[in-house]
Image (cartoon, rainbow, N blue to C red):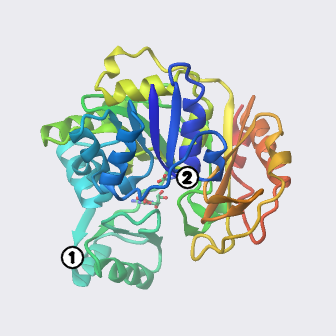
Amino acid sequence: MKILVIGSGAREHAIIHTLLKDTDVKSVIAAPGNAGIAEIVPTFPLDIKDPAATLQLAQSNHIDLVVIGPEIPLAHGVADVLRENNFVVFGPNKNAAQIESSKSFAKDVMMSAGIATARWFDCKTITEVENALDAFSAPYVVKDDSLAQGKGVVVTNDKAEALTHAEMCLEHGMVVVEEFLSGKEVSLFLLADGKRTIPLVPAQDFKRVFDNDEGANTGGMGAYSPLTFVGDDFGEFVAREIGDKVVAELAKRGMPFIGLLYAGLIVTSSGVKVIEFNARFGDPETQVVLSRLLSPLGTFLLRTAQGELDSLPPLQWSSESAVTVVIASENYPESPVTGYVIEGLELAKIVEGVEIFHAGTKAEGDDILSAGGRVLSVTALGKDLKSARSRAYEAISHIRLQGSHYRRDIAQKASENQG
Ligand code: AMP
Ligand code: GLY
């Protein structure tokens, strides 16, 4: 099988690294990729928002399966055009991808499917926002209705800040104001073949930029798996009670969801509730989830894309723990400063159990330069979270990147709780 992977993050680097372990995968190409991806597979330039260019790339390389990493091509209908031209695609069509690209669409689907989520109001004017904020007490949760790459949500006790964010979002569309939910967050990925879902292992993401969950929301600064606070049947429960219901509701609406349904969940005192859905693998959770996968990824993605989840054996997982820590550029997430040489990668790579997945990097001569907000995802496996953490941080101690920062507390509490 020959696979084209679309995207350029550490998520795509991890996906490709895992695909290459599948003996049924003959070759992988990536577009546009990054410096780390280019070290393991051929890469091609691509505007990921351009369905016609993506189609041409798939056609000229005789691709058997296209795996779409990020949400942007999904929202631009890249999967639609590929499917119309008979390609097998892992990633939903544009209408089904609205589960991520429109918060109010996702809420509507959840309501129809009877899925527990925070109470909410769709708001089109600032007066509606004010009324909605008053209907709930602080902390206030204000969300941009459309795709905002992790920056669309503000959770604050300060009503003025909530209103300012709402005003900014209203300039280009709708705002969702919702009830604050308190509990532990879980990212659960589900393979979805248009008819049903099967779960991967749960992971936890660290969304805030600084230690102790302080500072701005980011795309994700680190992740770990397994989780110490959910049982072994958690994934199956979510697949049955949430995943299958969402997929059935979307099928009923004539929008079959084929690809990865990412359930952003919160375990509250009154049960598991959905915070958000994404229509793709999460970044950086993918780096830890796939590190623990023992089954052949290519085969699973292909069968999912062909609508044949029923034909697959159960997924197999390593009992080891995985931790990933993101190294981000100076001033990420506000205005990342890039273009600096990254040093120490060779030494970091040889730490036992460690894989370094590249995100915003580019090669220049013999150097690897930072080229984005999130630069590297330093990922380690170990016999437990403590060992995985110490390996990841040992690898990081070898890496030098001017002005960069990373969280020092990824999986810290969980490693203390893991018996
Ligand atoms: P989202 O982009 O919807 O995942 O939101 C980003 C982050 O904001 C989530 O991971 C949560 O930490 C937080 N958040 C979003 N919605 C809520 C909510 N209703 N209650 C509490 N926290 C929330
Ligand atoms: N890590 C959060 C996301 O991928 O959306």
Q: How would you rate the neighbour count of disc 1 (Cα within 10 Å): few for under 14, some for 14-19, many for 20 or more?
A: some
Q: Is 227 on the left-hand or right-hand side of 168?
A: right
- Which residue is drawn at the image coordinates 61% and 61% (left, top)? 374
Q: Earlier in the sequence, mark 1 or mark 2?
A: 2
* Residue type for callout 2: Gly
- Which residue is drawn at the image coordinates 53% and 59% (left, top)? 219
Q: Which residue is mark 1?
A: 124
Residue 113 showing in the rendered view: yes
* Residue type for callout 1: Lys
Where is residue 260 drawn, in percent x and y? 39, 39
Q: Is 383 on the left-hand or right-hand side of 268?
A: right
Where is residue 340 drawn, in percent x and y? 74, 69
Residue 279 showing in the rendered view: no
Dividing the image into four quarters, tell me where ligand 1 lies: bottom left
102, above or below 22, in the image = below
Q: Which residue is mark 2?
A: 9
93, above or below 302, in the image = below
393, above or below 198, in the image = below
